[in-house]
Each structure stands twice: as C-alpha cells, then as structure tokens.
Amino acid sequence: MRRLLGALLVLALLLAALAVPGPASAAERARRTASVSVTGNGFGHGHGLSQWGAYSAAKNGLGHRKILKFYYPGLQRDTLGGKVSVLISADTTSDVVVRDRSGLRVKSLGNGRTISLTKGKATWWRITAAKRGARSKIAFTTKGRETWRTLRTVPGQAQFSAGRKPITLRTPSGDRSYRGILRSAKPAVSTSERDTVNVVSLEDYLKGVVPREVPALWPQQAVRAQAVAARTYAAFERRQPLASHYEICDTTQCQVYGGYTDEHPASNKAIAKTRKQILTSQGQPAFTQFSASNGGYTSAGAVDYLPARKDPYDEAYRGWTATITAAQVAAALPQVGTLADLEVLERDGNGAFGGRVVRIRVSGSDGSSVLTGDAFRSFFGLRSTMFRVD
C-alpha cells in the first residue's frame, strides 16, 4: 500500500510539473492590467468651428466670412444687438460687493429709483437681501473699518451701475471688473439667497468672451470668425434662458466670460469690425458650436449646418496620448471592479482611427459597462472621442 501511495504521489508531482497553464480568470487578467494607453486627435467635441482650423485658414489668407461658411454651411448673415444677463459663478456669496468709484449708482428694481453714491464716502458698497429677499439693503464700509453701515433699504432687488465705466466686483476668489450692471438677483423660488448677475450689452459681453476662447493676437480674421460664432451662440442661448433671473452662464457650459478684466485691444478690434454680425437659420440665431480642434474631421452635430466633413485646415492636437489606470476605472465605474480591458464597439466612420468612438466597453474583474464615447471622454478626461486603444 505504501508503495502504491508513493507511486501515485510521484505521478501527481510529474503531472503538475508538466501541466500547461490554462486561460487566466477574469480576476487574474485584471491583475495583469494596471492601465491601458490610448492615442487620439483633436481637442473638444469637434462640432462647428475649429479654433485651430480658423487660425490655419486665416494664416492661409481666408477671411472670416469664408471661414464661417466652411464650418457652418448653409447659414445666412444678419445683425443683432441687445443685452444679455450672465450669472457670475465666481461670486458664491449671497451679497454683491463692489469697490467705490466715480459715477457709481444703485437702483431699486422695486420702485425704479436710482441713488447716486458719493465717491469717497466709502471703500466698498454692498447689496444684501432683507426681509426674506423682498427688499434690498444698501450698505457701505469705510477705509480701516470692517463693519457695514446701512445707507438705506429699498423695495425689491437692486443693482449697481456706473454708466460705461467698469465696476470692480469682490468675490471669494478675487476682484474682477465688469461693464454694465451688477445685479443682486433673486431666483424665482422663495428664498433669501441672491445671485450676482451681470447685465451687459451683447457687444461688451463679447469683449470678455473672445480673448478667453482664442488668443487675442491670433490672425485678425480668425479672431473675427470667433467673434461672430460667439455672438451668434450667445444670441441662440439667450432665446432659451437658463433661469428666471439670468440667461447664460460664464463657464464652459455656456461660453467662458471674464468681463472687463480679460479684455484685450486686439480682440476688441475684431469685435468692433464684426459689430452685431450673426449667423441665422430660418431667421433665428444658429446654434454655432465651436471647439479647439476637430482632429482633421468635423463631427456631426444636432442640426444640418453642423455636418461631418474633412477639415483641410485643422492640423492641431494630433497624436496625443493618455493612460487609463485601474484606479481611475475603480473611481468612475466601481461596478466593473478592477480594470481588465477596453473595447471600442462602434465608431462614426469619419476621420482617423475609423472615426470618433460612439460606444466603448469597459471590462473588469466584476463585470463590464458600455459607455458612449462622450461619457467615456468625460469620465477619464480625454481631449476628444477621436482615439484608439493601444
């Protein structure tokens, strides 16, 4: 019996030594995949105007109208003015605090009365809500004193203005100057909270947008194309306000807007040279989306004047690389477990790598998840959806 057991043990050891490993389990594959690399083109969604494409086109002699015609085919030209109300996102407080200056006035929106604020009487002026937001308290502080002294309380909301002169607004992230009106605005819901809203002419609004979107010293025709696109985009957004007390925001969710502080003479010139010019579709401002670079091929948008087409001008942001780590996947998609693989399921067929990613599967130790290309890009901070998995 002992001999038999010994023989069986020797046989088992020999078989173990000669065994060929089988396919790794999902968990084992995941442990071997700490990260996945991707390579891509472009920066942004790729709809409409490519800012770097406009730059190259202008360098090659195209005027702003031809640039716009290429990126927004089939649109008509028109003119439009008026004002726009912009939420100032940096002012996260419920008051509006501005620096004293000549010509400063405060107006009650409850009775329409305007009060001139004497320069030198205060260092800072403030509007706060009073009596559950139904009234506004106007107060000031003087140099060397931190306490606020009430000047008066007025009915309704209130706002500061100084004619055509800019007003310096104090925010938790620093001081910034704006043209037009700075309003202490009350949301429609019953609350004592207030938002700071800049009410400004469309032309002055653009002065704080265009140099934030493209370098002001780029070729003038490229900056003019950006001015028309940005003016049209703002006019389009204005027709469908974001809230009852403001129309658009000052972040990338709308257009980046920095007010008077970010103005530049070169971009102001481009705005003046295209004064009130917009693009229209069926008589209304068009949805003129734009992005930094389309990677050589524009992406089809939600309307027919945002088609997918090869771009002979945009040569920027080619061959960028990024790494998707297991830690990033675990944070963004905990349900899939530890990263094992990425698999592109569908592309749009336009441009490099077979086009932009439409759907992609993320596989892990605990399962998989299918995402849109846009969602995947957002989760992992990629420059665009035109990429390949390396």
Image (cartoon, grey):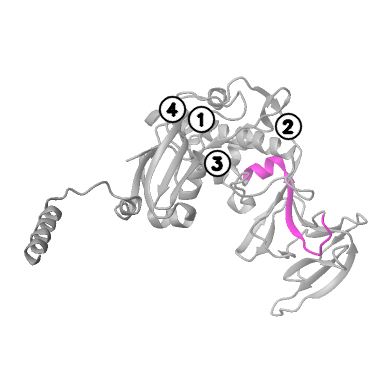
Which residue type carries mark 1?
Ser
- Spatial CA span between label 3 and label 1: 30 Å
The residue at the point 75 percent across, 74 percent down is: 141
Q: Nearer the viewer, mark 4 or mark 2?
A: 4
Q: Which residue is mark 2?
A: 80
Give the secondary structure at mark 4.
loop
Q: Are marks 3 and 2 in contact (CB under 8 Å)?
A: no
Q: Which mark is residue 266?
A: 3
Q: Which numbered disc flags the more N-terminal residue, 4 or 1?
A: 1
Which span is picked out in magenta?
Answer: 189-207
For the residues carrying marks 3 and 1, which lies nearer the camera in this image? Answer: 1
Residue pushed farthest top?
Answer: 74
Q: Quadrant of the N terminus?
A: bottom left
Q: Residues within 10 Å of mark 3 (few under 14, many from 20)?
A: some
Label 1: how many Cα within 10 Å (few below 14, some 14–19, many 20+): many
The residue at which mark 4 appears reads as 313
What residue is shown at x 79% (from left), y 55% (from top)?
A: 187
- Disc 2 marks a residue whose amino acid type is Leu
> Tag 4 or tag 3, which sits nearer the N-term?
3
Residue picked out by circle 1: 299
Q: What's under tag 4, amino acid-wise?
A: Tyr
| Amino acid type, mark 3 | Ala
250 sits to left or right of 349: right
Inter-mark Cα distance, 2 to 1? 28 Å
* Residue 324 visible to the viewer: no
Furthest residue toward right: 111
- Of labels 3 and 2, earlier in sequence is 2
Nearer-the-camera pick, 147 or 232: 232
For the residues bearing labels 3 and 4, Cβ distance under 8 angstroms: no
